[in-house]
Structure formats: C-alpha cells, structure tokens
Image (tube, rainbow, N blue to C red):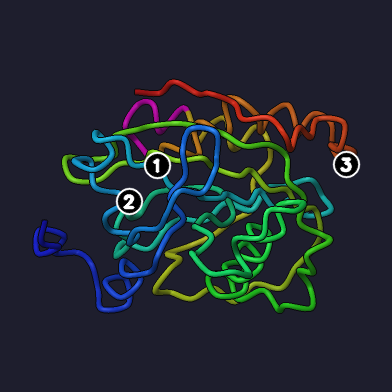
Amino acid sequence: MSKGNRVHLDKHQMQRLEEMCIVVDENDSVIGSETKWNCHLNENIEKGLIHRGFAVVLFNTENKLLLQQRADTKNVCPGSFSDSCSSHPLYKPLEMEETNALGVRRAAQRSLHAELGIPLEQIPLDDISLVTRMYYKIKLDEVCGEHEIGYLLFMRKDVTLNPDPREVKSYRYVTKEELEELLDKGTKGEAKVSGWFRIIAENFLFQMWDRLPDVAPLFEPEKIYRVNYE
C-alpha cells in the first residue's frame, strides 16, 4: 500500500517508516523483521503480524509523570497525548539482546535522547527498569493499528528536556488527578489520547503511582499480560 494517503507525514517521518522493526510471535520470540510502516498496517495486522515495542513512563522526584503530545506529523496517533516516550527496538544486534531486556532498554535510551533531547549521561541503562510486557491489538484508524508485544519501562528522576519538534508537539508533567482528568476528556472526545497509553494507564500506571517511589515489588519482567482492547 502506498503511503500517499498519509498526507500529514513529513520527510522525517516518512524516512522513519522504513526502519526495520522486530517481528515476534505471541510469546515474544523473534521470528523476523519488517518495516515500521508494514508493521502498523491493519491489513497486515489482520494476517497476524506482531512487532515488539516499548513505552517509557518517566516520573520526576515530585512524583509527576512526564506526558508527551505527539507531533502532528507522526504516522500513528498524531497530536495525541501519550506516555513519556514510546517507540520500537530495531532489528539490530544491540537492540535485540534479550538478557535483562537490554536491547529494549538501549532502544529506549536512544529514543529518550532523540525525541526528548535528554542528555545520555542523565539516562544510563541502569536507570531504565522493565516493569512488564503487554500483548495487545488495537485499530487506530482506517489504515493503521497496533499489534504489539509492548515493554513497559519505568524511570524516576529529574532530567533536562530539549524535545525535537519533529517528534514532540508539547510536553508537561502531571499529577495523578490531572491524568485522570485528561483520560476522562479523551473518553468524551475532548482530547486525543493514544490507545496504548490508555491501556498502560488503566491496567498498570495508577497502581505504580500509588507505590512511588518504591515500585519494584510490582515488576513482573517475565510475564506477558494479554490485554483485549479490540
């Protein structure tokens, strides 16, 4: 399928759609690779194509969550509020290393730096923790969707932000109550919220918030939650 019907995409995002994502089965075993564009096409998703992704929830030391509003030129969920940073590990040896989710954490470090401009010295790999994994399938619009094993990653620290406007439209730190208000607006159609972030918030995020700063007892890195949002 041509990308010509995604008229909101800019050159930067078109190039990113050619990146090679990691294709997995329902148990997160690697079975191949495919372009980011093909991984998100509903027609391929309906044939069973699953890819690996991640989402980072980054809290500051005041226990406020960093929200990102995605750029209007993004392929999926343009202009939507979402987690602090979400993307995909690429089909490269360094981002495919399985031990302690090292490959995915490397990909998250890369994206936190590239999208939010956080200096690499502020986001060492040891500060990025795997909470759990989520298997979910959602249709985002008539063309694209998500069928993903998503790694939920956690950070809590104060960082310096210098977002890339090609990736990030805006950002803000929110309290638990402010996020609840945003999600309610999303339900009413008064705000745009990414589908995967709603999954994270409703199934995991508020439990984590209630345990801050010690969320480690909630970590289940070996588990894959099967979330039905079709």
Residue 190 forms part of the magenta stretch: yes
Q: Which residues are magenta?
A: 184-191
Residue at figure coordinates x 77%, y 55% from the top left: 60
Residue at figure coordinates x 40%, y 58% from the top left: 33
Q: Is residue 88 left or right of residue 220?
A: left
Quadrant in the rendering for residue 4: bottom left
Q: Which mark is residue 50?
A: 1
Disc 2 residue type (three-letter)? Cys
The label nearer to you, 1 versus 3, is 1
Mark toward the start of the polypeptide (2 vs 1): 2
Q: Secondary structure at mark 2?
A: helix
Q: Is residue 3 left or right of residue 203?
A: left
How far across and how far down the image is residue 91, in percent? 48, 64
Residue at figure coordinates x 40%, y 33% from the top left: 186
**Is 157 above or below relative to 230?**
below
Quadrant in the rendering for residue 16: bottom left
The label nearer to you, 2 versus 3, is 2
Figure quadrant of the C terminus: top left
